[in-house]
Image (cartoon, helix red, strand yellow):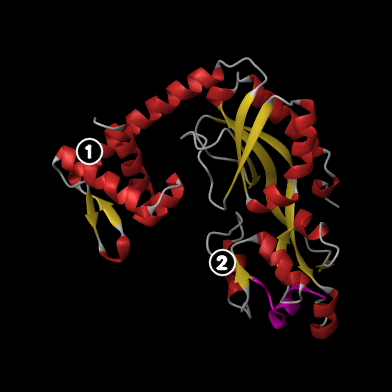
Amino acid sequence: MQNWDDLRHFLAVSRQGSLSAAARELGVDQSTVFRRLRALEKYLDAQVFDRRQHGKYELTAAGESLLAYASQIEEATFNIERDVLGRDLQVSGTIRVTTAEDIAVLLLPRHLAAFRQAFPSISIEVLTANRYFSLGRGEADVAIRPGHAPDEGRVIPRKICPTSMGFFAAPDYLKTFGIPQRHADLSRHRLLGWRGDLTVEGYTDFLDEIQGRDARYGSNSLIMHRAMAEYGLGIAFLPEFIGRLSNALVRVLPEDSYDSGFFWILHHDDLRHAARVRAFVDFMVAALRDDPLLTLA
């Protein structure tokens, strides 16, 4: 092949189904993805995608054949990189940590400050998104995720602690609209809607029910949900630690706790011998298990 970058852009489009989504995955603009695809098709003298309406890209027969080979090349490339990184015995270097925005902003900073004191030679890059960055494709080195048992090949999971969700509202909102005494009372209240790619495992139907109510305000950001609830725009369904961090919110229906799995910290098996990764994972497991915000009532 003339250029691995062309194949990398091809793989992103095949996974995402559109130029715009592939561009977001790769961190480039849409025109760059289009230009790379044109260069690849010119080199192969074949069309690898069928451009459908609404910007949808579907693989042609030639594209399907190319996908099998490109996936093998991608895996080999990442294996080479991880093998070199995995032999690093120095407690130094850079670790890319992926997690959700709310965890990154509200939970991690104080623990990262303590980690820096303990391991000053390690640099940390935090990647935030509601979507999961792939450890298998080398998009990140370590992931901190809530939910149920992870299902990603050759990834080593460490369970930290249970997680749960609950309803939170501002005192002024409750003074105006009343305090729900049971779950059925929520049907008469303004619930903030979960939008876009924001979701929680096991609660799809429950969230759809929330969306169907008076959810005139919503967001794909739990931090934004908390802020809107603080200003009385509605009742927010939040992870317990987010609600507890706010002095402007009170727990609604405190007897109702909604299990949302566990907090996990994960890294790829190929990095199990990397000293910097072992140091970070061991430190964060201990720190988060002792964090009072994550201790269930």
Left or right: 41 with respect to 186? left
Classed neighbour count for the residue bearing mark 2: other residues with Cα under 10 Å, few (<14), some (14–19), many (≥20) = some
Between 204 and 44, the residue placed more toward the observer is 44
Left or right: 289 with respect to 57? right
Q: How many labels does the image show?
A: 2
| Residue 242 in picture, x, y percent from top left | 76, 57
Classed neighbour count for the residue bearing mark 1: other residues with Cα under 10 Å, few (<14), some (14–19), many (≥20) = few
| Residue 186 in picture, x, y percent from top left | 72, 77
Q: Is residue 65 visible?
A: yes
Three-letter amino acid code at the position of disc 2 = Arg
Precedes in sequence: disc 1 or disc 2: 1
Q: Which residue is drawn at 58% across and 77% down?
A: 212
Residue 249 lies in quadrant: bottom right
Between 86 and 209, the residue placed more toward the observer is 86
Q: Residue at x 33, y 29 (%)?
A: 73
Indicate which disc residue 30 carries: none
Between 239 and 79, the residue placed more toward the observer is 79
On-image quarter of the N terminus: top left
**Residue linked to disc 1:** 65
Residue 57 lies in quadrant: bottom left
**Residue linked to disc 2:** 195
Left or right: 100 with respect to 118? left
Q: State yes or no: residue 226 in magenta.
A: no
Instruction: Determine contact: label 1, label 2, CB under 8 Å.
Output: no
Q: Is residue 156 visible?
A: no
| Residue 282 in picture, x, y percent from top left | 73, 28
**Magenta segment, which residues?**
181-192
| Residue 231 in picture, x, y percent from top left | 76, 74
Residue 191 lies in quadrant: bottom right
